[in-house]
Image (cartoon, rainbow, N blue to C red):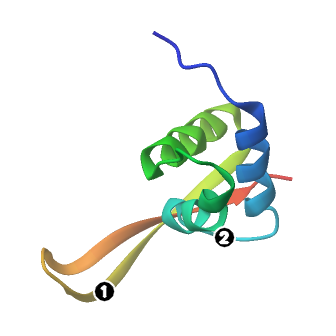
Amino acid sequence: MVRKLNQVLMNDILNVLKGQRLTGYQVFNIIKDNYHHLSRKLVYHYLSVALKRGEVSVEKVTEEGSFSWGKTTEKKYYTKNE
């Protein structure tokens, strides 16, 4: 089953990324008040679709710290392709 994309939501996500380097969680926090039933999972789905379409690019960064699972974590930062 293919999920029908909400083009308004996709445009909002792409507009938030314009000129910025953000994680999916940061994108979610910026636009969550505009959509009643928005979930982080849906934002990551839309970012995945935009990545496959070539509309965004992703940079994986390993950050060090003291986490419950170890000393490093990998974050994905998304940027809108021009």
How far from the left and from the top, in percent, is residue 14?
Answer: 76, 51
Using the image as rendered, state which of residue 47 and residue 10 is in the foreground. Answer: 10
Q: Position of residue 35 (x, y in %)?
A: 63, 49
- Whether residues under marks 1 and 2 lie with C-beta atoms below 8 angstroms apart, the answer is no
Judging depth in this view, the residue of 34 and 70 nearest the camera is 34
Quick one: quadrant of the N terminus? top left
| Rendered image quadrant of residue 32 | bottom right
On the rendered structure, is 47 left or right of 62? right
Mark 1 residue type: Glu
Q: Which label sits on residue 64? A: 1
Q: From this view, report whether residue 17 is shown above or below residue 69.
A: above
Sequence-first tag of 1 and 2: 2
- Where is 38 relative to 61, above or below? above
Q: Where 12 sits versus 46, above or below?
A: below
- The residue tagged 2 is 21
Q: Tell me the residue at 69%/55% (across/down).
A: 34
- How many marks the image carries: the answer is 2
Disc 2 residue type (three-letter): Arg
Residue 60 horizontal side relative to residue 13, left or right: left
Secondary structure beneath label 1: strand
Residue, far front: 36
Disc nearest the viewer among 1 and 2: 2
Distance CA(mark 1)–CA(mark 2): 19 Å
